[in-house]
Image (tube, rainbow, N blue to C red):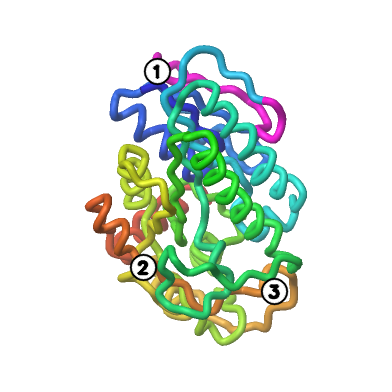
Amino acid sequence: MRVLITGAAGFLGSHLCDRFIAEGHTVVGMDNLITGNMDNIAHLFGHERFSFIKHNVSNYIYVDGPLDAVLHFASPASPNDYLEHPIPTLKVGSLGTHNTLGLAKHKGARYLLASTSEVYGDPQVNPQPETYWGNVNPIGPRGVYDEAKRFAEAMTMAYHRFHGLETRIVRIFNTYGPRMRLNDGRVVPNFIYQALTDQPLTVYGRGVQTRAFQYYSDLIEGIYRLLHSDESQPVNIGNPHTEITVQDLAERIVRLSGSRSPIICIEPTDDRFVDDPQVRRPDITRARTLLGWEPRVPVDEGLAATIAYFRQRI
């Protein structure tokens, strides 16, 4: 296959590039580097089956030659990023999705949208199945990301129904691992950075809100299987076995890193925590049934590998 991966220099996009190259495919990477990092794909430059285009997918896209698949992973994804870049976040979810869908239609390519568990908002059911419509505040600070992804899903399904385009939608739950940025703003890199620099680990609120954390390699496997499946409806990819509180996560990172850092609770004071989900856990029945997929990496094993990665970069 020859595939286009948008957001190729990002945390997940770069790992996807690696997977497709490893499977013998040809990859065209695209990124405007608003949050991506060329270091993530530097090892691919010079590879005969990899090329890179610096481009903002919210503008018209031109890619020479055939494409068999388009994977749309371009978007700010952490609260720090989408609150700093609210309008580009809305644009990449709307205009960027429209442009990449149009490209896939023109090339006769299969299309895969990277959606998110954030489409469920602050859920009133736990775990969250794909049939749950969500509890989202469209005008809150987080709405720029939540609603961009919900719109992207709606447009993807419109192209599937109206144009007969082969489409796939993955709803990604909390994922961590190497190539996350130290200043990402999400809880895993925050805690690891604080632990490795002997700063207090700052838990917002009482630390009882839960997240289900999956290691990046499990997610990449699920995405790869989904692309090659026949499933057009959204599919959750996450680890339901690892739903833990934020307080528990902090304690694990302190233990695994050998840090002397204390853990302190502080009250949140900024927009990152407005409408912050209190529970988050995927129902992966659909992924198990349709893809034969199951997460494999235990949380402590994945955290240890991520800590080792960050330790080399501090």
Q: Estimate how packed mark 1 is, as few (under 14), some (14 to 19) or many (20 or more) residues with alpha carbons within 10 Å.
A: some
Comes first in the chain, label 1 or label 3 = 1
Q: Amino acid at mark 1?
A: Arg
Residue indicated by mark 1:
49
Q: Quadrant of residue 131?
A: bottom left
Tell me, yes or no, whether the highlighted magenta stretch contains residue 55: yes
User: Which is nearer the N-term, disc 3 or disc 2?
Assistant: 3
Mark closest to the chain's N terminus, 2 or 1 = 1
Q: Which residue is mark 3?
A: 274
For disc 3, the neighbor class at 10 Å (few under 14, some 14 to 19, many from 20) is: few
Q: Vertically, is 146 above or below 261?
A: above
Q: Residue at x 46, y 61 (%)?
A: 174
Residue 206: give x, y in percent of width and height.
Answer: 56, 87
Whole-angstrom CA distance, mark 2 to mark 1, is: 36 Å
Considering only vertical position in the picture, is 118 above or below 4?
below
Whether residue 9 appears in this view of the structure is no
Residue 286 pos. (x, y %): 32, 59
Residue 304 rendering spot, x and y as whole percentages: 35, 60
- The range drawn in magenta is 44-60
Q: From what the image shows, is residue 35 above or below residue 256?
A: above
- Secondary structure of the magenta portion, mostly? loop
What's the amino acid at mark 2? Asp
Distance from Cα at disc 1 to Cα at disc 3: 44 Å
Residue holding disc 2: 283
Q: Is 289 displayed left or right of 51 in the figure?
A: left
Q: What's the residue at 44%, 54% (across, down)?
A: 234
